[in-house]
Image (cartoon, rainbow, N blue to C red):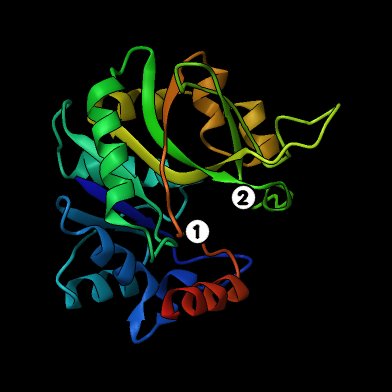
Amino acid sequence: MIIIPARIGSTRFPSKVTADIMGIPMVIRTAQAVRQLDSVVIATDSEEIVGLAESHGFRAVMTSEHHKSGTDRIHEAARKLELPDDEIIINVQADEPFIEHEVVERVYELTRARVDGESILAASAYKRINNPEADDPNLVKVVTDAEEIALYFSRAKIPYPRDHHFDDYKGHLGLYGYTMASLNRYCSLDPSALEEIEKLEQLRILAHGYRIAMVEVKTESFGIDTPEDLQRAIRKHLL
């Protein structure tokens, strides 16, 4: 199952998930982009979004307005849906209206192959980015080991190229795969100091000694954080 967390509030871009993209709200365009892969549910704290979802043929689940992360929101929705422990759940961010379904499929396959609920709690993806792109703190960087297990995520430029120019960073995509069992375990963990410092929820997993499996993908999509991002994405995909 694909669950899209859609919080109505946003400090940098108010109500961004309902922003118009060529006549379709952003969250609906995201759902349409991935609907061919699996059942799609929108987890939200907004009656407005519930209405939008239903008017476009998607199921929506009302969740608490007090969740601090999208993962906590999809967990509440998954529990309300009474999903079994072996159900694969893909968390697709509502601000990825141009996400390619092939990218989501790669994370689905990795989740099925590697997420065990014991040592590996989640699967995710990265794309190659260059040195100037890596300067953007909104584009999270990840470093991995030889088996493509995440070592750390940061808004800072990692690894730091001390002695030479480096132009091969890994940009993390806000896309996660869980089983219901591993999602339950994640949401039982206490928030970590690293998570609070970087404002990156995935660091909770690493801070508690669990692991995240990663896969490299090719994508033109990117998360939309500002009105300027939205206009850039629309221009890019109209060309």
Indicate the secondary structure of the residue bearing disc 1. Answer: loop
Label count reads 2
| 3D distance between C-alphas at marks 2 and 1 | 9 Å
Residue on which the image places disc 2? 139
Task: Check the picture and name the quadrant holding the C terminus.
Answer: bottom left
With respect to residue 31, does 142 lie above or below? above
Say which of 41 and 216 sits in front.
216
Residues marked 2 and 1 touching at CB (< 8 Å): yes
Can residue 168 be seen?
Answer: yes
With respect to residue 34, does 182 lie above or below? above
Residue occupying the far bottom of the picture: 23
State which quadrant residue 49 falls in.
bottom left
Residue on which the image places disc 1? 222
Disc with the residue nearer the chain's start (2 vs 1): 2
Residue sitting at x 31%, y 71% = 29
Residue 206: image location, x then y, percent: 53, 21
Task: Check the picture and name the quadrant holding the N terminus.
Answer: top left
Residue 10: image location, x then y, percent: 55, 65
Residue 192: image location, x then y, percent: 60, 26
Q: Residue 192 vs residue 117: left or right? A: right
With respect to residue 197, does 131 lie above or below? below
